[in-house]
Amino acid sequence: MAQQTPTQYRSTVVPSEVIQSVSPALGRYEQEDVADLWKRPQLSARDRSVVTVAILVARSQTADLPHYVNLALDNGVTPKELSEVITHLAFYAGWTNGMSAVAVTHEIFRERNIGVDQLPASMPEFLALNEDGEARRQSSVKNLLGTSSPGLEQFTTDPLFRDVWLRPDLSLRDRSLVTISSLMANGQVAQLAGHLNRALDNGLTAEQAGEVVTQVAFYAGWPNAFSAGPVVAEVLKGRS
């Protein structure tokens, strides 16, 4: 399938005539504003696809997910990367949301003849662990949880930070991009500052971080975007 350019972009699987039959105004916004969103240069079409798939998976919005998974593949997200996005979000958005995404993506992979040979290994050669950073993270979790939930503390260390985050088929920058997109989409801003700082350390730019908020506004709603926006502003101010 040929790669789609932003000018070929369709924001939904709902036909234009159906939108017009229910809400002509929404049809106009879809044709003008949402289409313009995908042309903005602050995020590549590939990154917008990653962010949008993350939003839909995090919110279990599976009706349009096949369209956006296909668009992601057309925009250069590899099957390995898409597989890792879903794996990552099972931890950050919930196991059942991850499994719902698996069910949708299974059909798309079948239609595109994407086999297991094109997917990440279940046990790859992991990236090197930043021991100092991991020690600081564990200390922070211990201070936060105390002795209240040893199970959560254990599983946060392994498998999340000593396994999932070290899987090599999705870059650390993209793992951070997926994580902050999920947190913003669900209005979970309590951990957003920490993960946004990690994202910036992992190579996401300040401009890209701000544009994620814009993408979230359209795909998860303005209230979630405005909950995230001040947190992003404060983090960027602190790093300037």
Image (tube, grey):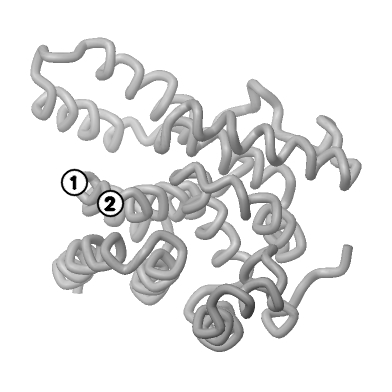
Which image quarter is the N terminus in? bottom right
The residue most toward the front is: 21
Which image quarter is the C terminus in? bottom left
Q: Name the amino acid, label 1.
A: Ala
Q: From mark 1 to mark 2, how far is it between C-alphas?
A: 9 Å
Residue at the spot 16% in from the left edge and 72% down from the top edge: 237
Camera-nearest residue between 132 and 154: 154
Q: Which residue is mark 2?
A: 187
Cβ–Cβ under 8 Å for marks 1 and 2: no
| For residue 193, side relative to residue 65 (left or right) | left
Q: Secondary structure at mark 2?
A: loop
Tag on residue 88?
A: none
Q: Is residue 54 above or below residue 152?
A: below
Q: Quadrant of residue 209?
A: bottom left
Q: Is residue 234 above or below residue 24?
A: above
Q: Name the amino acid, label 2.
A: Gly
Q: Position of residue 155 (x, y in %)?
A: 35, 17
Q: Secondary structure at mark 1?
A: helix
Camera-nearest residue between 37 and 223: 223
Residue at the spot 56% in from the left edge and 57% down from the top edge: 50
Q: Which residue is mark 1?
A: 190
| For residue 111, side relative to residue 138 (left or right) | right
Q: Quadrant of residue 77?
A: bottom right
Residue at the spot 65% in from the left edge and 33% down from the top edge: 102
Q: Quadrant of residue 87?
A: top right
Q: Position of residue 125 (x, y in %)?
A: 62, 27
Q: Nearer the viewer, mark 1 or mark 2?
A: 2
Q: Residues within 10 Å of mark 2 (few under 14, many from 20)?
A: some
Q: Is residue 105 above or below residue 239?
A: above
Residue at the spot 75% in from the left edge and 35% down from the top edge: 106
Q: Residues within 10 Å of mark 1 (few under 14, many from 20)?
A: few
Q: Position of residue 11 (x, y in %)?
A: 62, 71
